[in-house]
């Protein structure tokens, strides 16, 4: 089959490369000429494990990039909207890029004389596909949804860093279509994956995505809440969760307590679901608590540090880990951001190290000493906060000897002080 993919960010470029791997002909559409050139040269516009290989394999063969909507729509059966849906000022979802893409798509569909399917893959709150995208495409194409073109909401469940693997090995594919014809077209695209397809309507598909992410976020905040109680009682929360997680109804994953969740999805999606609920007159207390616990959690690390070393003014504090999780350079909603912000507000001298994410953080904080290694960051430090679950931090030991005062607050349970040869004053955030 032939598909076009609008937007070459993390979801768009991964979907494009993976559809090519599934044997389809793919046209990437991006308004950014640089990205178009990059993709046509077989270079991935973002870093994702396995993406470069796939683009190299299919670029200029069954995968091309263009900024020409008319060409892409004319030469494909379906177009996937994979553009960003950032949070607006009040936390609600900003649909301006989705709307612009829908309008461009509508104009191109106006010139096409056969059936085309519009697929929304961007994460959008329930009702958006039917009440925003569909009418815009109808308006700009002058055609009728369900007759001249189809509409489907097909959410993604891709983890950053593992997105290619997740696309090729989904535990579910959700096809929320306005009618059987468009549902059939999109289902066919995934046929080779041989996985269960959930056929539903667009608003249910939109909701499935939000509930999936909000539930995982809820598990983490639940683990953090329990962790805060366990800490007071001298109980190791990880031991508790290891046992609780053996119950197949609960499952162990996403019960690691610590500094909380960050990233481009969880914080944004939980807030957007709350925003949507508020809009229809329901105030979701549990979801609000998920956000509140997550906001409090990183600052707890500073409180623990203050309990150990007192006032932080003019103290050198090392922040290890800037990325929102390991194996990525993404700092969006990273828990290290509120921590650095607070440390600077309290007058601390902040030194930071991250194996990949230094560049992004430099754009946010200028008054931080960015270091090239953990040991450099730990030199003469009065305290250290471990923010990201990077594997290399698990092996820290002798490096702590460089500190002036060996206080280590661990936000990810990476260090076992009993196994170290260097003596440190260790405190886990919730264990
Ligand atoms: C997530 C979802 O997993 C994915 O399905 C969705 O489509 C996009 O959002 P991602 O943002 O890449 O993926 O990160 P993930 O690996 O899920 O971790 C999210 C955050 O939660 C990280 O900050 C991580 O440190 C934190 N986390 C995760 C915990 O604090 N505890 C846990 O037990 C698990």
Image: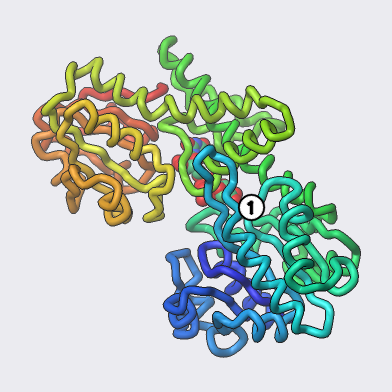
Q: Is residue 197 left or right of residue 88?
A: right
Q: Is residue 165 left or right of residue 70?
A: left
The image shows residue 381 at horizontal and vertical percentages of 13, 33
- The foreground one among 385 and 104 is 104
Instruction: Classify residue 169 by image quadrant.
Output: bottom right
Q: Is mark 1 within 8 Å of ligand 1?
A: yes
Rendered residue at 56%/28% (across/down): 290
Instruction: Classify residue 81 by image quadrant.
Output: bottom right
Which residue is identified by label 1? Answer: 123
Rendered residue at 68%/72% (across/down): 105
Q: Is residue 223 left or right of residue 259?
A: right
Rendered residue at 26%/24% (across/down): 426
Task: Report crowding for label 1: few under 14, some 14 to 19, many 20 or more residues within 10 A (C-alpha).
Answer: many
The image shows residue 207 at horizontal and vertical percentages of 73, 44
Instruction: Classify residue 377 by image quadrant.
Output: top left
Q: How many marks?
A: 1
């Amino acid at each position: 089959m032939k598909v076009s993919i609008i937007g070459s960010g993390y979801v768009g470029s991964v979907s494009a490369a993976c559809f090519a791997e599934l044997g389809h002909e793919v046209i990437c559409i991006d308004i950014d000429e640089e990205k178009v050139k990059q993709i046509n040269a077989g270079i991935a516009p973002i870093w994702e494990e396995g993406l470069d290989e796939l683009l190299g394999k299919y670029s200029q063969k069954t995968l091309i990039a263009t900024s020409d909507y008319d060409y892409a729509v004319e030469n494909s059966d379906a177009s996937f909207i994979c553009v960003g849906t950032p949070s607006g000022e009040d936390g609600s979802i900003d649909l301006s890029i989705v709307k612009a893409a829908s309008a461009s798509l509508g104009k191109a569909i106006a010139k096409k004389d056969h059936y085309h399917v519009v697929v929304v893959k961007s994460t959008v709150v329930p009702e958006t596909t039917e009440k925003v995208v569909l009418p815009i495409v109808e308006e700009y194409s002058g055609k009728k949804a369900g007759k001249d073109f189809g509409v489907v909401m097909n959410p993604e469940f891709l983890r950053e860093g593992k997105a290619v693997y997740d696309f090729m090995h989904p535990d579910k594919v959700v096809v929320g279509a306005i009618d059987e014809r468009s549902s059939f077209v999109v289902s066919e695209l995934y046929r080779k994956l041989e996985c269960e397809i959930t056929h539903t309507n667009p608003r249910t598909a939109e909701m499935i995505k939000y509930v999936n992410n909000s539930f995982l976020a809820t598990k983490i905040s639940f683990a953090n809440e329990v962790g805060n109680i366990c800490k007071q009682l001298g109980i190791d929360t990880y031991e508790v969760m290891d046992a609780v997680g053996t119950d197949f109804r609960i499952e162990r994953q996403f019960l690691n307590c610590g500094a909380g969740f960050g990233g481009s999805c969880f914080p944004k999606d939980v807030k957007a679901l709350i925003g949507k609920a508020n809009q229809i007159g329901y105030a979701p207390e549990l979801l609000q608590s998920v956000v509140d616990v997550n906001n409090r959690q990183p600052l707890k690390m500073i409180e623990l540090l203050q309990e150990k070393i007192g006032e932080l003014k003019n103290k050198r504090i090392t922040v290890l880990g800037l990325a929102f999780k390991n194996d990525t350079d993404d700092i969006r909603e990273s828990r290290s951001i509120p921590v650095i912000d607070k440390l600077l507000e309290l007058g601390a001298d902040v030194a930071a190290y991250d194996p990949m994410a230094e560049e992004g953080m430099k754009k946010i904080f200028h008054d931080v000493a960015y270091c090239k290694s953990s040991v450099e960051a730990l030199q003469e430090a009065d305290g250290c906060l471990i923010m990201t679950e990077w594997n290399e931090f698990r092996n820290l030991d002798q490096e702590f000897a460089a500190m002036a005062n060996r206080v280590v607050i661990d936000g990810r349970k990476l260090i076992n002080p009993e196994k170290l040869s260097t003596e440190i004053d260790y405190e886990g955030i919730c264990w």
